[in-house]
Amino acid sequence: MQKGNKILIVEDEFIVANDLKMILKRNGYQVIGIASSVLQATTIIETQKPDWVLLDIILKGTETGINLAVQLNERHTPFLFISANTNQGILEAVKETKPYGFLTKPFREKDLLIMLDIAKERFNTEKKDQKPLVKATESKYGEEAIIGSSPALKEVLSQVRLVAPTDTSVLLLGESGTGKERVAQSIHLLSLRQQQPLVVVNCAAIPLSLIESELFGHEKGAFTGAQNRRIGKFEQASGGTIFLDEIGELPLEAQTKLLRVLQEQEIDRVGGDLPIKINVRIIAATNRNLEQEVAMGNFRLDLYYRLNIFPIAIPPLRERIEDIEILANHFLALYAAKLKKNITGFTRDAITQMQAYSWPGNIREMQHLIERTTLLAKDPLINVLAFTDHMDGQVKVPGHHSPKLGSLEEMEREHILRVLESCNGKISGPGGATEILQISSSTLYTKMKKYGIKSDFY
């Protein structure tokens, strides 16, 4: 028995628990027990000391898997969630416990084993003092590099390093402009498929009538206007990686056909007679909350399960304040050279302005701002940024005076207050402060407590 293979199963459904036990034992793991409640699990943990715990969210008794996760963190015992629960509030609470994986029911044996392998590798990596992936990625991409050294970015790159060598499906989550395509490129270049094609598909840009032909191809004469055979994106990517950007925009009919491709690893060209076998690694991305889309009936639950094997959340730029100056200087050097202008950098006031701004358009918005600022700049050192009127209500165009700025904490406190006022004090849910600020309710309450914001303020 290998070290690190002692597993406790915490699951109140006997059939699911027994299936897990059989899968694990078949693949060389030692199942030291099955518990149906937190109390029972705690007793086994104290006496048997498992290396890993697989736990469901809803258990027998008054305490949940989330309560047990808190205890496991205190004991430094790694754990993974296995659950069919898609309630947004519960999932937010699960994320706060920082599990080493989350597998949705129903699951395949292969998905469970891959998740365990990745979780163990991630756990072992965290115990070592390894250098971040940033420089290696920069050397591959040059000006298109993933740039930064913030803790939030290092966490993303650590996950990229773990999942890249596998064939596991990856789901990239994050706002528009955060660099999801750059992360997908990094995963591909660090994989065993790096010599094969990476095919990028913008699902939101394909006309509804052409989705099937674009993804799976068509035979000559398959429909009016099909004058030649077309090789679809999946067939083009065979042997390599396909990146399905904005996967949440696919209509339900296309989702059904995509699910079959993922399960069977074969496609049917429109008008074709026989299925075609393919070998493709899937990376998908979305700026939508797929859990909410599932709840609203806009996204297939089984497809969500299939894609969500290894989710990576890409942080917005406002959560990477340490990277803002690095990124700004990178784009400045790029556009100064492109426009043949002798510009050496930014003043401290200019950097402070950028760090205080909320960047709703993220890195893409910064890139456009720096290009515009470089074009308008007349001095070697930039002091005034070419903010436009629509950018978060701030008017900072050349020749205008910027509003008085305070510390980052003062600016954040004022911004939170303005948001709370705008939504009449509503914290969560549609139109609530957490939705506008793009943070969890627990994070917002922590910040409110930190800044002394009480209900009578708004």
Image: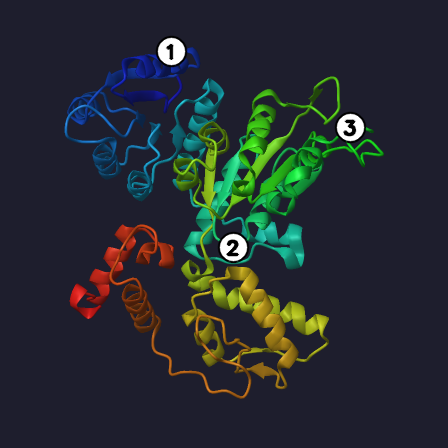
Mark 3 or mark 2, which is nearer the start of the sequence? 2
- Look at 53% across and 33% down and name the residue there: 252
Residue 136 coordinates in the image, percent (x, y): 59, 49
Q: Say what secondary structure mark 1 lies in.
A: helix
State whether residue 433 is above or below residue 310: below
- The number of numbered badges drawn on the structure is 3
Residue 168 coordinates in the image, percent (x, y): 53, 30
| Left or right, 6 with reference to 364 | left
Residue 83 coordinates in the image, percent (x, y): 34, 28
Regarding residue 391, the answer to whether it shows in the image is yes
- Look at 41% across and 71% down and name the residue there: 356
Mark 1 or mark 2, which is nearer the start of the sequence? 1
Q: As shown in the figure, which amino acid type bears the numbered disc 2?
A: Thr
Residue 254 coordinates in the image, percent (x, y): 59, 33
| Circle 1 Cα neighbour tier, 10 Å, few/some/many (<14 / 14–19 / ≥20) | few
Would you name the residue on which mark 2 appears? 178
Which quadrant of the figure contains the C terminus? bottom left
Q: Say what secondary structure mark 2 lies in.
A: loop
Would you name the residue on which mark 1 appears? 22
| Left or right, 177 with reference to 36 | right
Mark 3 or mark 1, which is nearer the start of the sequence? 1
Regarding residue 136, the answer to whether it shows in the image is no
| Circle 3 Cα neighbour tier, 10 Å, few/some/many (<14 / 14–19 / ≥20) | some
Q: Say what secondary structure mark 3 lies in.
A: loop
**Callout 1 touching callout 3 (CB < 8 Å):** no
Would you name the residue on which mark 3 appears? 222
Q: Nearer the viewer, mark 1 or mark 3?
A: 3
**Residue furthest to the front:** 224
Q: As shown in the figure, which amino acid type bears the numbered disc 3?
A: Ala
Q: As shown in the figure, which amino acid type bears the numbered disc 1?
A: Met
